[in-house]
Each structure stands twice: as structure tokens, then as C-alpha cells.
Amino acid sequence: MTKSYQNLIGADWKAADSGATFTSVSPANHDDVIGEFASSGPADVDAAVAAARRAFGSWSLMPAPKRGEILFRIARLLAEHKEELSRLMTREMGKVLPEARGDVQEAIDVAYYMAGEGRRLFGQTVPSEMPDKFAMAIRRPIGVVGIITPWNFPVAIPAWKLFPALICGNTAVLKPASDTPACVVRFVELLMEGGVPAGVVNVVTGSGAQVGNAIVDHPDVRVISFTGHTETGIEISRRAAETLKRVSLELGGKNPIVIWEDADLDLALDSVVWSAFGTSGQRCTAASRLIVHRAVHDEFVEALRKRVAALVLGDGLEDGTDVGPVINDQAVEKIAAYAAIGRSEAELVIGGEPARDGDLARGSFFQPTIFTEVRPEARIAQEEIFGPVTSVIPVDSWDQTVEVVNGVKYGLSTSLFTRDVNLAFRSIRDFDSGLGYVNHGTIGAEAHLPFGGVKATGNGHREVGQAALDFFSEWKSVYIDYSGKLQRAQIDMSFVDQE
Ligand code: NAP
């Protein structure tokens, strides 16, 4: 029997108004049906937004340290249920179990960090220009936030968005990706168990066109936090402008690892395999470009080919699996189309085909793939493939390297392997990206520093860390005049004349 899941509206789990449903299946084995979910529409979004509005009054007035205590409880609950959630994630999304544990751990880390913010949420106090006057700026909650998340980090990304939104006193309507609704429903069940009051977090499952658009268009939703494809983000931004919403967009990437001639090649190899093929290359920070100094190109590419040839594809729940499936068959088709383009533009080193041997035929698998002698302007070096495919671009000079690194429309994560401290600092200054690494791959951000990118990777906002509080709160500047008389700022300057 397929298990049925419903929307969370206020305190109640409810079927879609239309009664329609859709299923989520495992990408490792399409016969493994995870569950049946509400295929919702605008009426369900209306109900969820109304519940979030009702809950806003008391949640926003709850002292922030008390909201923080709820987040502390949630952090502990997530830790207690880490293995269960991780296994569900591997089954539903496909990433190998150790990586799924990392995804849940990110949510735990953000819960602890934002719980602590309940006792800070620092504002600003500044000296006034006038005598006997006090000046400060405080953070205020904004209202109902709409959260739209992708499938590749199905617990971490909802946590990145929800926890700062909640600690700031907002309430939320969350729409998970249609490929990973079970992870989000289970995550939110734990939030409720941790003490989040009814209506503070609502979940509406269903398609981007039906549910996503209705959230973005809703006049009572004041903020949209979205992670997904750049094209979807642009469309959301355009629609949200109609109701003047605040919008945070975390979008695509085409992240380079630069391997300089003096690099520790063994370390670089370990990092490249992890950054390019972890999560089957389906991370926004995946290393899809390897910019390799010509002096070490042949040695590096041959060593990488050997490492990739030894990677074991399979179900992420099985011990010994290095690379899990990609998210679904449409993704296999898209990656295969890029592999065909790659063959016409560059030299194939290894891979390049869907993987269908034995049990792999039951799911959506693609061989880890490397191209070399890729021109920087080639399509496979410019466009986000979002699969286990990486392109080696040989370079001869530092100036050329900077040009190639920056010569794409995205700017999320960049990395340089070198022993030259001067080049290391130059890379941080000159590479256009929101995250910069030295002697480390393109993945590995921590929960207390801002996360996000430049150029087509976003619209200038950052997630997690202090930066997330700025997005999910509104500044109010407050002036308290205790002089007992009218003091006109910038006009009544008599106290200056007295000196
Ligand atoms: P996506 O297709 O853009 O979908 C993301 C979410 O938006 C899903 O919930 C989707 O719903 C929904 N959606 C689709 N069309 C919509 C519309 N017109 N209006 C409102 N919502 C809509 O992206 P994805 O395939 O899930 O995720 C992969 C992308 O995310 C990659 O480009 C990756 O680089 C990016 N990403 C970026 C970051 C970052 O921090 N920069 C992190 C992770 C991932 P359905 O699932 O129902 O279609």
C-alpha cells in the first residue's frame, strides 16, 4: 500500500482541495514508490497563507529567546532522527547515505545557530546628532514568507530558509520540490513535534506552475525565498514585482577548480572527485569546470580518469556505493544531450552515457563523465549541466586563468589549488564568486557565514549566517527625544553655535 501524505494547513494535515495527488518515486529504483502527495493548487495556497497570517500575531510577539528555545528543541529532535531522515533522503533523492547525513547535519547546525540568534538579533544604537535624543534601529518581522525549495538539498535548504525566517518572527508557507516532498513533510513533522505552533509553518505540495506561482502571486505573502534554476528565478522575480515582494534568489552555478602547476595533485584529485561527482554532480557548487595548468594537465587528467573509472555507481543506501542516481529520467536525458554536445566540442576522457547495467536499469543513472581540451566558450563549459559531468580546460598563464574563471554567467563557488600564497590571495581578490576556496574543493560551506553567489547565481542576497537575518527582517529606526522641546534635525544647530 502506498502511503498518503497531505498538506499542512494550520494545525491540520489536509488533502488538496481538488483531491488530486501525485507520487514520489526513488531515483535508484522506480518501482520503489515513496508516497502519494497532495497535488495542490491556488485554493490550497490561499488556505495556507490565511493560516500563516492568523499565526503571525502571536508568533511575532513571542519573545525571540523563546522562539530560540523552540529551535533548540528542533535541533535536538533532528539530531535524534538524523539516521531516519537521512535514509529517507537517500531513498527519495538518491544521494549516498553519508552525504544525506551531511544534508541533515546542515539543518541541525543552522537550527543551533539560529536558536542562539534568539538571544541576539542585534540591532544598532548610534549617537544622535542632537542633544538629549536617543537613536537606534531594531529588527522587525515582515509577515508571511513564501519558501520554494529544490530537490538537491531537500532538508538543508528548507532549514536554511525556515530557521532564520522563524527566529525573526515570520510565519511561512513552504512548497517543496515535487521530486522530494517526503523529506520535507517528515522534516516539518519534526518541527511541529519540537513545538512550532500551528500555522507558523504550513506546507503545500504540488507543481511549480500551480503552487509555486500561487505563492509568488499571493498579495499576503510579503517575502519569497527561492532556490532553483536561474530561469525559474527570473520568472519568479518578474511575477513578484507585481506585488512588490522582497525576493531572495539562489540560482545556478558553473563552478571552477583551478589546479596550478605547483598544486598538491593528490589533494587536488581527492577534492575534484568529491566536488565534481558527489551528489552525482547535482550540487549548485559542483565543480563542473577544471581549469588545469598545461604543465600538469596530462598527469592530472590520467590520474583523474583512473579514479573515476573506479567509482561504483548504485543505490546510495548500499555500502560501497560512491555515486548514486541522478534525480529522474528527464535529468538522464538532459545530461545525455549535453554529453552528445560535448563529443562534438571536446575530447571525451571517460563516461558519456546513461548507466544501465544490471540493477542500474531500474533507476536513473549516468556514468561519471570527463571531457578535456574543452574551449572556455564551449557549451559544456558555459551551461549548467547538473549531473556527473566535468570539463577540463587547459591554461598556460595566470591572466588566462582569471579570464576563464570569470568568463561564465554564473558566480557561486571558485577554488584554487596552489602552494603559492600570493596566487592564493589573488584568487580571492580576482575570481568573481560568492564563495572562494584555497586548497579545498568548491563544496563545504559552513552554517555561520553567508552563502550565495554573484552574477546570474542570484540577486545579491545571502543565506544563513547574519546575512539571512537581514533578509528576513525589516529595519525600523527609532528616535526618542528627551529634551522636552522641539528639536529639528539638521536645522536647529544652536548647540553647535554655543560652543
Ligand atoms: P527548479 O526546477 O527551478 O525548481 C525549484 C523549485 O521551484 C521547485 O520547488 C519547483 O517546483 C519550483 N518551481 C518550478 N517552476 C516554478 C515557477 N514557475 N514558479 C514557482 N516555483 C516554481 O530547480 P531544481 O531542479 O529543483 O534545482 C536545481 C537548481 O537549483 C540548479 O540550477 C542548482 O544550481 C540550483 N541550486 C542553487 C543553490 C544555491 O544556493 N545557489 C542551491 C541548490 C540548488 P517543482 O519541483 O514542482 O517543479
Image: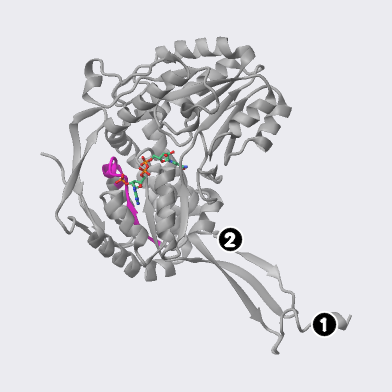
Do the CB atoms of the residues marked 1 and 2 lie less than 8 Å apart?
no
Dividing the image into four quarters, tell me where ligand 1 lies: top left
Above or below: residue 288 compared with residue 156: above
Above or below: residue 84 compared with residue 169: above
Where is residue 20 shown, x and y percent of the image? 15, 51
Residue at 25% across, 64% down: 47
Which image quarter holds the N terminus?
A: top left
**Mark 1 residue type:** Phe
Asked if the beta carbon under badge 2 is closer than 8 A to the nearest atom of ligand 1, the reply is no
Q: Give the structural element (helix, strand or loop) at label 2.
A: loop
Where is residue 224 shown, x and y percent of the image? 42, 57
Residue at 61% across, 13% down: 296
Horizontal arrangement in the rendering, residue 251 relative to residue 418 (left or right): left
Q: Which residue is mark 1?
A: 495
> Is 480 within the magenta?
no
Where is residue 414 shown, x and y percent of the image? 57, 33
Residue 2 visible within the image: yes
Q: Earlier in the sequence, mark 1 or mark 2?
A: 2
Mark 2 burial class by Cα count in 10 Å: few <14, some 14-19, many 20+: few
> Is 182 within the magenta?
yes
Where is residue 351 shown, x and y percent of the image? 38, 16
* Span highlighted in magenta in the image: 171-184
Task: Tell me which corner region of the image, top left, top right, bottom left or bottom right, holds residue 54.
Answer: bottom left
- Which mark lies nearer to you, 1 or 2? 1
Mark 1 burial class by Cα count in 10 Å: few <14, some 14-19, many 20+: few
Give the Cα distance between marks 1 and 2. 31 Å
**Mark 2 residue type:** Phe
Residue reaching furthest bottom? 485
Q: Which residue is mark 2?
A: 122
